[in-house]
Amino acid sequence: MSFFEVHDPLFGAYVLGNAPVKRLATGFDWVEGPVWFGDQQCLLFSDIPNNRILRWTEEGITTFRHPSNYTNGHTRDREGRLISCEHGTRRVTRTEWDGTVTVVADGHDGKPLNSPNDVIVARDGSIWFTDPHYGIMTDYEGFRSEQAQPCNVYRVGTSGKIEAMVTDMACPNGLAFSPDEARLYVADTGRMFSADPQHIRVYDMVGGRPVNGRLFHTISPGCADGIRCDSDGNLWSSAADGVHCIAPDGRLLGKILVPELVSNICFGGRAKHRLFITATTSLYSVVLNRKGAQWP
């Protein structure tokens, strides 16, 4: 059985024929937001409908936080602290090393956020997050509520100032910087219960701001949700049939095949060469001949 599809010869060097896709745990409802803690040899991820953050180690699954305020996406800041997007409280938070939780952002222009979804941290320490309406459209992943904001991408500077940075999307979802931070990639998954186009857009970063937004790639089958870059600048994206690897010029290079709808991904492991995959009810991983670009 093959665990991958090669669409470009380059991809043949990215995958290892003797490194299978492994299911690490299952029995969840809808998992998202994987983030690797190499200093603790564990992965955190969200089981959103069950209102909990789980911890995976080689010994198994334990609960990191319950209730979690229906947390979705996670990342780590430049000091290694956990940054989380909470649907239930409509905010972005930081978990300090002593376990206390600090609010990073919970509103813009005097109105509450929608339901922060995914988050990344730039080299300058600024926190970038998407704010679609998915977590407030039903009671499945939070609390059904009125939408108060357009669905934007926001930046929170080290001073705490929040700014809308991408405002031309229907519903931004996953996001990632290229390794040199010259580009910002954002998945537009479209509004729920609509026929909005679903694609990945790319922006040039000029003076710390995203400009020249344009179509980068359209995932098929399914659509892009979580996205991450490897150290060579390839973009890895969730899809309905697994994880797709896309070259910096937008070409599909190949696919990692997964038997469930994939929601999100992150690189981790001892050399950042292990791709962790959240997919509907399960957590998977596969070892690659690539390294993730994320820090730490």
Image (cartoon, rainbow, N blue to C red):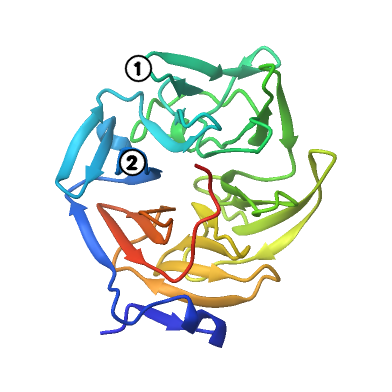
Residue at far bottom of view: 9
Question: Looking at numbered disc 2 in the image, what kind of residue is underneath it?
Answer: Phe
* Left or right of 170, for residue 32: left
* Sequence-wise first label, 2 or 1: 2
Question: Looking at numbered disc 1 in the image, what kind of residue is underneath it?
Answer: Gly
Q: Which residue is mark 1?
A: 99
Q: Is residue 8 visible?
A: no
Q: Position of residue 75 (x, y in %)?
A: 48, 38
Q: Mark 1: few, some, or many residues within 10 Å (few <14, many ≥20)? A: few
Residue 107, placed above or below residue 214: above
Quadrant of the image for the N terminus? bottom left
Residue 77, placed above or below residue 264: above
- Residue drawn at point x = 44 percent, y = 71 percent: 289
Q: Position of residue 8 (x, y in %)?
A: 56, 85
**Front one among 30 and 175:** 175
* Left or right of 47, for residue 118: right
* Left or right of 267, for residue 124: right
Mark 1 and mark 2 in contact (Cβ < 8 Å)? no
Q: Secondary structure at mark 1?
A: loop
Q: Which residue is mark 2?
A: 45
**Front one among 245 and 233:** 233
